[in-house]
Structure formats: C-alpha cells, structure tokens
Amino acid sequence: MTRQHKEKHLPKYFFLHLLLMITLYVSAITFIIITFQIINITIPDILDPGYEIRFAKERLRGALSFFIVMLPVFVGIAKYLKREYTKNAAVKDMRIRKWLVYLTMFIAALIILISCGTLVNVLLGGELTLRFILKLLSVLFVAFSVGWYFYTTTRE
C-alpha cells in the first residue's frame, strides 16, 4: 500500500480496530456478568438474606442482550480485518492496531494478576467457597482467552 493510499484509509482502519476492541471488551465483560449471575442463581449466598434472585435474573437478562449483540459484531469485524491483513500486510502493521493489541494483552495480564492476588487474599482469610472459585475461574478463563487470542495474532 502506498503512503498516500494508507493515509487515505487510516481513519477507516482506526475506527474498525477501535470498534473491534470495544466489542471485545463488552463481550468479555458481559460474559463474566452472565457467568456470575448464573452462579448467583444456582448457588445462592445463604449468608445474605437480602439477596434476591430476581435482581440476578434482571442482570443476567441485561448482560445476555448486550452479549448477543456485541459478540457477532466482534466476530464479523475480526474476520473482515483478517481478510484485510492477508490482502495487505500494511493494515496489520498499523501503529494503532499494535497499540490496541498490546494494551489489551496488558489489561488481560493485569486482570490475571489481580485475580491471583484476590485468590491468595481469600485463601489467607479462610473464606474460600465454591461460588468464589467458580467466579474466579470465569474471570481467569476470559482473561487468558483474550490474552492468548491476541498473543497468537501477533505471532502470525
């Protein structure tokens, strides 16, 4: 791609990459909310008598609605950009893409570290429960998946 052609399409690819990351973040967050609410509904906290399943179901419905919209958009943009990368390596080498990818991997690594710190804190406090373990595993699953996805895309 010539410099002039690249600069002409820069806003297009900038916003496509930005939208890709936003839809990824919303999909990941809503997936975690969905898993948390399923855990809250199936394993209620008996020490919190004020907790109502109705609120968990409302949060579950809200998260599902965003997940159903955002995930297909993320997948569609990712497929489109992958085709663009094979057509033109300059698009893959764009500075904005690299910044967003490495920022995302950095955030995923931070989430993993914070989750591990939280696990150690809970273990030291002696308050380890099945609910906590399942929620921690869902966060770790999402963070590892996102981090691994972008790690592998940087190696291609």
Image (cartoon, rainbow, N blue to C red):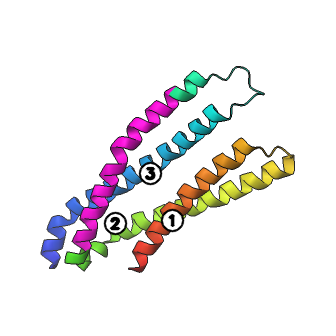
Does the magenta segment cover residue 103?
A: no
Seen at 35% across and 67% down, the residue is: 97
Q: Position of residue 118 (x, y in %)?
A: 73, 51
Of labels 3 and 2, earlier in sequence is: 3
Residue type at numbered disc 1: Gly
SS type, badge 2: helix
The quadrant of the image that shows the C terminus is bottom left
Residue type at numbered disc 2: Ile
Q: Does 121 sit above or below residue 13? A: above
Seen at 66% across and 60% down, the residue is: 113
Seen at 73% across and 21% down, the residue is: 49
Does the magenta segment cover residue 62?
A: yes
Residue projecting furthest to the top:
50
Q: Which residue is mark 1?
A: 147
Q: Are marks 1 and 3 in contact (CB under 8 Å)?
A: no
Q: Does 27 sit above or below residue 51? A: below
Seen at 66% across and 48% down, the residue is: 134
Residue projecting furthest to the front:
42
| Horizontal relation, residue 138 to residue 46: left or right | left
Q: Position of residue 36 (x, y in %)?
A: 59, 40
Of labels 2 and 1, earlier in sequence is: 2
Q: Which residue is mark 3?
A: 25
SS type, badge 3: helix
Which numbered marker is on residue 96? 2
The quadrant of the image that shows the N terminus is bottom left
SS type, badge 1: helix
**Disc 3 to disc 2, C-alpha distance:** 17 Å
Residue type at numbered disc 3: Tyr
Q: Are marks 2 and 1 in contact (CB under 8 Å)?
A: no
Q: Position of residue 149 (x, y in %)?
A: 45, 67
| Horizontal relation, residue 141 to residue 150: left or right | right
What segment carries the magenta color? 58-85
